[in-house]
Amino acid sequence: MNEHAPALVVMLPIIGAVLIMLIRHNNLNWGIALISGISTIYYSIILYLNARSIGTISYAMGGWEPPVGIEYRIDEFNSLLIALIAIVSFLILVYARSSLNIELKKNKISTFYSMYLLCLGGLIGILSTGDAFNAFVFLEISSLATYVIISMGNDRRGLLAAYQYLIIGTIGATLYVIGVGLIFIITGSLNLYDISVKLGDIELYRPLLASLAFITVGIALKIALFPLHAWLPNAYAFAPSVGTAFLASTATKVAIYLLIKYLYLVYGFDLVYSNQIFIFVVLSLSIIAMFGASMIAIFQSNLKKLFAYSSVAQIGYITLGIGIANYNGLTGSTVHIINHSIIKAAIFLAIGCLVFSSKIVNIDQLAGLGKRMPVVAVCITVSSLSLIGVPGTVGFISKWYLVLGSLEQGLWVVVFALAVSSILALIYVGRIIELIWFHTPVGGMVSPNKMPFEMIAVTVLMTIATVYFGIDTRLTGDLAKIAVENVLLGEQL
Amino acid sequence: MSSALYNFISSYNYYVIIFLMISGLFIVVSRGNMVKKLVGLALFQTSVYILYISPGKILNGTAPILDDGYSIYSSPFPHVLILTAIVVGIATLALGLSLVIRVNEEFGTIEEDELFDNELNNE
């Protein structure tokens, strides 16, 4: 079975999704989701180990040889992200059952698990496929499942958020297809590796730039890069808590990987980065994201929306590393993809606990939380500090690499921007920490629902991970370095 | 003059594509009615189908069915891709319309201006 692991990591969640729709028994379906989640983790780890020991794996889907057939290309970079996403989404699934019982109507829970797994399958598909059009299909599979997840919550505004995302997401995916279409017209191929070889000896500069622009903007809509982020805050705020945690820790990260793949592995470093305007646009949008989104986050009163805007700002950090485009900058980006995924999972799972126990939605309701629910309060505090980048947490590691990278390039403005945006993050996080620990509860204290063990356990585990990987960087930093060295910058170094 | 005309006619389908693409996108941006927005979106997606199909045509080529009498065939590759894209487009449109039905049930209107001002931005 192991030689079919590239297909299995994509197929297992999708098979699980179909089974769940057929069975429609809430607790049984939770079991099925867990089984397909854990088997996905098993095969994703096998994939990573294989990619490390024998190098890039090329898998011909259905036995049709590339470049005509669809090829799955697994290297040290995408298999690392596949393993990350499989593990994080499995942990969120463990947490999901109790939270969904409170937040969803009983007859919707099975559908939720099904959409969750479908989305997971789609995201892993985007990571593993080596075919431009196949990536589009998986992008749409995961997006369609995402729209359903967002619309499912008890808050009816979720419907509007889902519709808004559907419109923007479809425009993004269509722009991506237009870009792929232009590449297809130029090269006559859809296999990404084949395209990267053929683009080497093509003189048509302008259509190539047009396709680069279409693909970048299309994927940027999915990433929620700053001016294109309008869908994200509402989608995160009104989705069920489990859905928010899942989307925040996986969906945008996968889109960022797709962008990195196009910039470095398809178009190639030389073509993209000989273009000064492109670097300027990416760097300045990232910096505006870091400032603008943090500024908006300061004025939010809805807890989930605040962290949604902070996500937009953090995405700015990741794209900043792509713009810096040297070894340390890219390592910073890759590490931050992993770290931000862990941080945001921890934060949104903790918020899910708050919704579960006492229906907390707004920031004011946090007052005196430290006395009422000390464990969850500590989780939110620690993971928020990690968001700022306090030394000893994962956020510090990412920022360290980003600062190193921009110093090497002589980008002093960027270093300054990193420092100032950390102060902005300090303001909105500080407000929350102050309310939690230094205020007394206002009004009648709602007697909190008793928290189920697994919800607390997963939240605490994620929070511990944000500290642990901040001290011991062998699993995150070193693996990210290897991925950047071997896959992205292979020829430059 | 005749060469300009020739150029125009030979790339006529690309002008149609660009026109459809822009008008679809314009409807999505300018209309506030949720159903009309989806119609614009469908138009935008359809224009891409033609973008893919057009370069597949080869001059003097026949339909891609193996036969002894012919040696030049149009490329069947884009057709296969667009079949998939059409399915994706239908799924998106169906999901979008069902969301609009649910929105209408919950809020009693499908005009975005009213909905977004009253619901999403008033916190």
Image: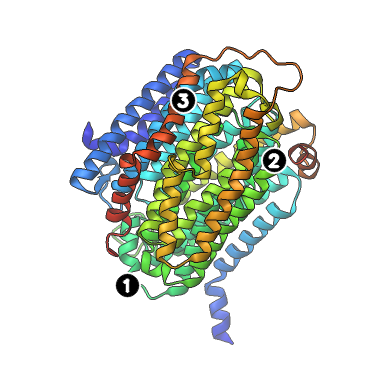
Amino acid identity at mark 3 = Val
**Which residue reaches farthest left?**
A54
Give the chain of mark 1. Answer: A
Residue plotted at (72% across, 43% down): B34
**How far from the left and from the top, in percent, is residue B121?**
75, 41
Q: Earlier in the sequence, mark 3 or mark 2?
A: 2
Q: Is residue A70 visible?
A: no
Q: CA distance from mark 1 to mark 3?
A: 53 Å
Q: CA distance from mark 3 to mark 2?
A: 26 Å
- Is residue A268 left or right of A275 when viewed as pictured? left
Type of amino acid at the residue the image marks with label 1:
Asp
Which comes sooner in the sequence, label 2 or label 1?
Answer: 1
Who comes first in sequence, dot 1 or dot 3? 1
- Looking at the rendered structure, whether the residues under marks 1 and 3 are on a common chain is answered as yes
Closer to viewer: mark 2 or mark 1: 2
Q: Amino acid at mark 2?
A: Gln
- For numbered disc 3, what is the local secondary structure? helix
Whether residues under marks 2 and 1 lie with C-beta atoms below 8 angstroms apart, the answer is no
Looking at the image, which residue sits at the far front? A438
| Chain to which mark 3 belongs | A
Q: Which residue is mark 2?
A: A300
Q: Residues within 10 Å of mark 3 (few under 14, many from 20)?
A: many
Q: Foreground residue, B18 or A157?
A: A157
Q: Quadrant of the N terminus of chain B?
A: bottom right
Q: Residues within 10 Å of mark 1 (few under 14, many from 20)?
A: few
| Residue that mark 1 sits on | A201
Q: Nearer the viewer, residue A322 or B3?
A: A322
Which quadrant of the structure image shows residue A199? bottom left
Residue B12 position, x and y percent, is 57, 70
Badge 2 crowding class, 10 Å Cα cut-off, few under 14, some 14 to 19, many 20 or more, is some
Q: Secondary structure at mark 2?
A: loop
- Residue A460's tag is 3
